[in-house]
Amino acid sequence: MGRIIAVANQKGGVGKSTTAINLSACLAEKGKKVLAIDIDPQGNTTSGLGVDKNAVGNTLYELLLGEADVNDTIVKDVVDNVDLIPSNINLSGAEIELIGVDGKEYILKNIIDKISQNYDYIIMDCPPSLNMLTINALTAATSVLVPIQCEYYALEGLSQLIHTIDLVRDRLNQNLVMEGVVFTMYDARTNLSLQVVENVKDNLQQNIYKTIIPRNVRLAEAPSYGQPINIYDPKSSGAESYRLLAEEVINREDE
C-alpha cells in the first residue's frame, strides 16, 4: 500500500492546492504512480491539473454519496503518472447530505482502500476548514502535510489543526502521523519571512521540511494554464523547490 498524505491547514491561501498539485507532479516525475484527490469544493487542484471542473461527469461528490463508482470517477493521466479524482462546487453540499449517515467519517477511507494498492502516493487537497470533508481525509490518511505561509499569523490556527489531528488519531485513525510542516510563499527580501520560519521552528515540536517554497511568479501563473510548475516552467525556482520537496517526502519513507 502506498502513502496517503492529506495536505491540510484550515487557513486559506497558504498554498495547499499549489502544494498538492506540484508535489503530485514532482513525485510522478520521479517515477512514482500518484493519485491526487481534490477534497476542496473550490476545485483548484482539479483545474490546476488541467481538468475542466464544471465539465466532468463524476466527481468526489457523487463518489461520497454512493452515486458513482471509484473507477468511473478517476481521470487517468492528467499528467504523466498522475491520476485525479476531481471536485467542484457540488462538493460543498456533501456535508449536509451526509448528516445522519452511519460511519460518515470513514466513507473516503473505504473508497481509498479499494484502490490504494494501485498507487505509490495518494495526495489529498483538503478544504480550508476543519469540516467533515477534512475529517474524512484525516481518517483515510497515513500522514498530514501542513503548508504554512511565511506571514505574521502563520502560527494562528496551527494549534487547532494539531489538536484536530490528535483527536482523529485517538478516535478514528490511530495510524495517523504528522508528515511535517512545509513553509510556502517565502520572500527572501523580507525579514518577516525569516522571523516566521525561526518562530515556527522554536515553537513547534513537529517535523519541518528543509525545503522552503519561495514566492514565485511562475508558480502563481501555472494553475491558470492547467499545468503543474515542473511542466509549465521546469527551470523556475518554484519547480526546483517542489522537486526538492518530493525528494524529501520520498526519503522520509526510507527513514
Image: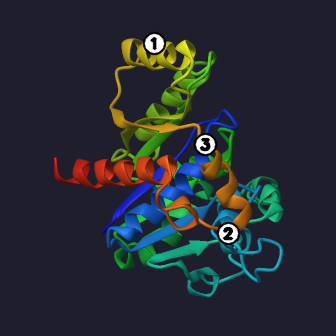
Mark 3 Cα shell of 10 Å, populated few (<14), some (14-19), many (≥20): many
Q: In terms of depth relative to the viewer, which is nearer, 186 or 65?
A: 186
Secondary structure at badge 2 equals: helix
**Residue type of the residue flagged with mark 3:** Gly
The image quarter containing residue 152 is top right
Q: Which tag, 3 or 1, sits closer to the chain's start? A: 3
Residue under label 3: 15
Q: Residue at x 77, y 74 (%)?
A: 52
Instruction: Please tell me whether mark 2 or mark 3 is closer to you in this view.
Output: 3
Q: Residue at x 57, y 18 (%)?
A: 190
Above or below, 225 against 237 in this view is below
Secondary structure at badge 1 equals: helix
Decide if residue 222 is in sight here.
Answer: yes
Which residue is the extreme one toward the bottom?
72
Residue under label 1: 199
Mark 2 Cα shell of 10 Å, populated few (<14), some (14-19), many (≥20): many
The residues tagged by marks 3 and 1 sit, at their Cα atoms, a distance apart of 19 Å
Query: Can you give x and y, in whole percent of width and height, for residue 37 in the image?
Result: 57, 64
Q: Residue at x 44, y 78 (%)?
A: 81
Query: Can you give x and y, in whole percent of width and height, for residue 209 in the image?
Result: 35, 36
Query: Can you give x and y, in whole percent of width and height, for residue 198 in the image?
Result: 41, 14
